[in-house]
Amino acid sequence: MAGFEIGSVPFNPDGWGPPDSSPLLSPHPSHVPFAPFSRSDKLGRIADWTRNNPFHNPTRSNQTRNQTPSDSAFDFTGDDSFGPLAADEDSSFRLVDGKPPPRPKFGPKWRFQQHRNQLPQRRDEEVEARKREAEKERARRDRLYHANRSGGNAQRREAAAFKSSVDIQPEWNMLDQIPFSSFSKLSFTVPEPEDLLVCGALEYYDRQYDRITPKNERRLERFKNRNFFKVTTTDDPVIRRLANEDKATVFATDSILSTLMCAPRSVYSWDIVIQRVGNKLFFDKRDGSQLDLLSVHETSQEPLPEAKDDINSAYSLSVEAAYINQNFSQQVLVRDGNKVTFEEGNPFANEGEEVASVGYRYRRWKLDNDMYLVARCEVQSVVEANNNRSFLTLNALNEFDPKYAGVDWRRKLETQRGAVLATELKNNANKLAKWTAQALLASADMMKLGYVSRVHPRDHFNHVILAVVGYKPKDFAGQINLNTSNMWGIVKSIVDLCMKLNEGKYVLVKDPSKPQVRIYEVPVDAFENDYVEEPLPEEEQVQPPTEAADGGEATAATNDVEDKEIVPEA
């Protein structure tokens, strides 16, 4: 068995390492430095294959030597003890793998960067086309935004849809011009009103409609056999009787008073006829006036189509909204023949005529020591709870196309009803304020708002009821920032102004393009039957648009809702 021989280790009495002269070092090259062997120094690597080749980049080698002093002991580039052969071999040396060593995959920096740039980014024609479309859409939104900021959108709406509700004749004399800014600081407090007379009959409200949701919507029925009356002040026989009895000085209706009270919120043009007879003042409306209709999207920034024949034009939507409001106010009632009757019947109905459920409250307010105002106020229904009778007003908001409002009622009514109401307050601020003012004038205990939508956005004949919500008028007025004192301050200022006029006929016109009203003195025979300036015939107000073109719809319209109940759609 061969043994293992351990060579002799010479002793160095002068320090560490082998002695300078040793028989063991004779066959080895001389002047070869040894690595530093001190406890304070770091030991170098025996073989470092990741080092860059210093022969191809002398600058780099110098930097490397300066940066890593522990490796300088193994740098023999300046040593000629190996002879010219070693130099030739080093000059022909090429490092096979020249990439830097892999970085350790640990630490916070690696955790956040490990998934970055794993796949090359796709930049083909489809991606580029999508980016160009996004840029175009962003540019279009920017143009619309700047147009809204500069008032360009408002000017476009005024030029397109806003025209005067009445033709101003050359012989009319303009007496005064009142800007809406002067109405904001007016304030007047009136005492509680008193009921002089209550007429008509009311049906009870059907509480089942409070549980309607978009999932169990109800089809809106049609009530062609019930008559609805839009009688002006001077044509009301009860008001004539009260005027002859000298019960008050100023006479009006709730529709006219609410228009005056909410005038600063109005955008569309409207007009009110004022007649000064002796010491009395009558506020009237023309036959076929804008006051008989309901505005839609009046305060919205989205312009409606300009063509009058378009189903989404301002005129067509007003007729549709008025028709929906009438049918809704009669459908949500318990039609079992049980009614609440008052002192007198409907003053406008003939004997045996079927009329809508409505109660007229002739109420009197004290404006001054010797000045009283009498107005005819309407309520549409009544409920009884705990032997207490409460009056209700019934109105309906209508959705014609979700693209204009920006909120889809069928999706948002159940989960985001507040957002739907906020959108309606933005787009129909004047209409909601007028409904609230009418409920306050009638001292209604509750105002019911129905949400009625088209079956299809392009079908303006068929509608469905999606929800019915009740509000207390005083609380709702506070939510929409409707100040009762300011409302009466506007009425009091206009009454005081008109009482200074001479006897005759005047017209108060809202300017179609500016927030102001003008008072014109007109001939006594103005707005009579032979006057040619009525823009909206009466038959177009109470009847829906002709449906002869739709055969199935015409057949369905002939059915009476009393005879056949419409089954709600699934």
Image (cartoon, grey):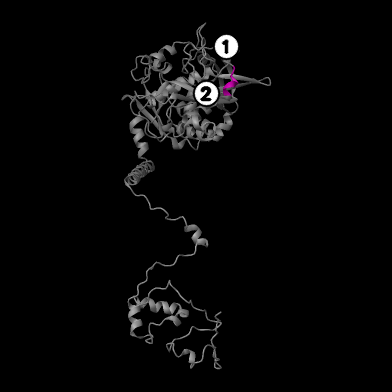
The secondary structure type at the circle numbered 2 is: loop
Judge the density around disc 1: few (<14), some (14-19), many (≥20) Cα neighbours within 10 Å. Answer: few
Judge the density around disc 2: few (<14), some (14-19), many (≥20) Cα neighbours within 10 Å. Answer: many
**Res 319 seen here:** no
Q: Position of residue 442 (x, y in %)?
A: 56, 23
Q: Position of residue 58 (x, y in %)?
A: 35, 78
307 above or below 119? above
Q: Is residue 530 magenta?
A: no
Please state which of residues 175 and 470 is positioned toward the viewer in this rendering: 470
Identify the residue at image location x=49%, y=30%: 409
Q: Earlier in the sequence, mark 1 or mark 2?
A: 2
Q: Quadrant of residue 208?
A: top right
Residue at which label 2 appears? 217
Per the rendering, the mark at residue 344 is 1
Q: Position of residue 400 (x, y in %)?
A: 43, 27
Identify the residue at image location x=51%, y=89%: 18
Residue type marked 1? Glu
Please state which of residues 355 and 52 is positioned toward the viewer in this rendering: 52
Q: Position of residue 225 (x, y in %)?
A: 48, 11
Please state which of residues 418 and 77 is positioned toward the viewer in this rendering: 77
Please state which of residues 129 and 153 is positioned toward the viewer in this rendering: 129
Identify the residue at image location x=49%, y=64%: 104
Front position among marks 1 and 2: 2
The secondary structure type at the circle numbered 1 is: loop
Per the rendering, the mark at residue 436 is none
Residue type marked 2? Glu
Region rendered in magenta: 204-210
